Structure formats: structure tokens, C-alpha cells
Image: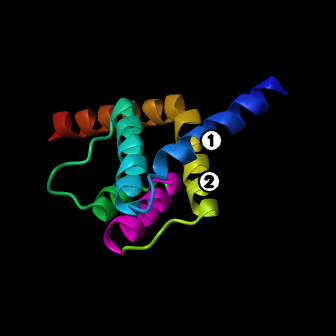
């Protein structure tokens, strides 16, 4: 019960951080940056030449694809995020963070496979 209350508090706090008045582009940047920081901890870094959509396609992770769509809509489409969209983003970020250890292991395996391939060539 206490864990559920803490989780709800975190989601509401995160949602408030992203709602910065009427400037939704700042909100979009805030949640996208949080996602990028989480991905960097896992071992995935967006290259400067990559668009957000290219990076999301490369990773092929559902939370990353969805967050990127929200980011692009809010940042470049001048569309205000609705409350339920902000909550969805919070849920997606929490999902990404919950799976951080599993994703780190997956990333390490990818690096090992790349290394083995390079050694054979």
C-alpha cells in the first residue's frame, strides 16, 4: 500500500515538472531529456546526427517510440499535451526505469556480439 502511494506521488510530481505553464515545448524537452538520461545509463546514446525518430527506430523499444512521438508532437507540432498524455509519459518513463537492469544486460550482450563479429572479420 505504501509503495503504491509513493509511486502515485512520483508520477504526479513528474507530471507537474513537465507542465510548465503554457510553454509545452519546455515540457516536451524536459521529459525527452529524462528519457535520454535513462537510456544513457543503460548504454544507449543518441548521436548528434540522429533525429529523435531515427534514434527511437534504432532502439526499437516501445516506451522510447511512444515518448518520442509525444516529444515530436509537443516540440515541433505546437500541440499541448493533455493530462492523460502526461500521465502516459510518466508511466512509460517508469516502465523504462523499472526495466533498466534488463536493458543494460541486453545492451552488454549487443556489445559482446558486435565485438565477436569484428574479431571474425
Name the residue carrying label 2.
87
Q: Is residue 111 above or below residue 81?
A: above
Q: Circle 2 — which element?
A: helix
Q: Quadrant of the N terminus?
A: top right
Q: CA distance from mark 2 to mark 1?
A: 7 Å
Report if residue 39 lies within the magenta region.
no
> Which residue is rendered at x = 56% and y = 56% of the image?
86
Q: Find residue 55 and report its image quarter.
A: bottom left
Q: Is residue 70 above or below residue 64?
A: below
Provide residue 100's location: percent of width, then percent of height.
50, 33
Query: Is residue 97 left or right of 75 when viewed as pictured?
Result: right
> Which residue is rendered at x = 36% and y = 75% of the image?
77
Name the residue carrying label 1.
11
Query: Is residue 83 left or right of 80 when viewed as pictured?
Result: right
> Which residue is rendered at x = 14% and y = 56% of the image?
49
Q: Where are the magenta residues, as a range?
A: 62-77
Amino acid at each position: 500500500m505504501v509503495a503504491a502511494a509513493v509511486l502515485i506521488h512520483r508520477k504526479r510530481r513528474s507530471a507537474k515538472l513537465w507542465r510548465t505553464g503554457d510553454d509545452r515545448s519546455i515540457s516536451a524537452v524536459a521529459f525527452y531529456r529524462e528519457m535520454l538520461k535513462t537510456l544513457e545509463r543503460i548504454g544507449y546514446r543518441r548521436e548528434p546526427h540522429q533525429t529523435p525518430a531515427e534514434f527511437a527506430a534504432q532502439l526499437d523499444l516501445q516506451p522510447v517510440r511512444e515518448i518520442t512521438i509525444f516529444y515530436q508532437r509537443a516540440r515541433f507540432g505546437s500541440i499541448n499535451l493533455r493530462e492523460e498524455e502526461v500521465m502516459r509519459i510518466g508511466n512509460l518513463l517508469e516502465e523504462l526505469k523499472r526495466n533498466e537492469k534488463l536493458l543494460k544486460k541486453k545492451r552488454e550482450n549487443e556489445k559482446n556480439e558486435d565485438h565477436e563479429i569484428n574479431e571474425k572479420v
